[in-house]
Image: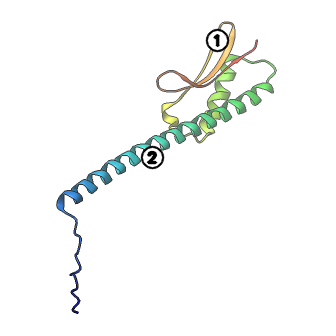
Amino acid sequence: MSRTTQPISHHRFTMLELLWAMMVLGILTTAFVGQYSMLRQMQTSFIQGNRCLIVMDNTLERLALEESITQERADQLLADEFALAEIPGKGNLRTRCEWRDERLVLAIDKPNGHPVVQVPLSP
């Protein structure tokens, strides 16, 4: 009785399979990079909002120590606190202090004019 052995077959990838795998890998990489970029933007926006709230809180604490609040003094205190803060994207933000509906409104605005934080003060 003689035994025959079958030769070991080596499975090799075809060029088409390699191209398909590279295409899938490219799509997954692109999706990952896009999501990562979006997450970084969200993180920066979150940090920016939190630090602007801290600036506003510090300004309000300093205003509470004042005997009378004028627009010029409130604007100066807000600008001072804003200048000291380490806020990402700070160059794109601006502080605002104005009278609106007989209330003094303090705000830190985004470039599009929408406030990051806005606080109306009671008369």
Quarter of the image holding residue 66? Answer: top right
> In the image shown, does 6 or 116 lie closer to the viewer?
6
Name the residue located 54 percent from the left edge and 42 percent from the top edge.
Answer: 43
Residue 121 position in % (x across, y down): 72, 17
At numbered mark 2, what does the secondary structure look like: helix, strand or loop? helix
Which residue occupies the extreme left position in the image? 15
Residue 53 position in % (x across, y down): 66, 32
The amino acid marked with disc number 2 is Tyr
> In the image shown, does 64 or 101 lie closer to the viewer?
101
> In the image shown, does 104 or 3 lie closer to the viewer?
3
Name the residue located 23 percent from the left edge and 85 percent from the top edge.
Answer: 5
**From the image, which quarter does the C terminus lie in?**
top right
Spatial distance from mark 2 to mark 1, Cα to Cα?
Answer: 41 Å
**Which residue has dot 2 on it?**
36
At numbered mark 1, what does the secondary structure look like: helix, strand or loop? strand
- Report the disc number at residue 107: none
Residue 27 position in % (x across, y down): 32, 48
15 with respect to 91 (left or right): left
- Report the disc number at residue 99: 1
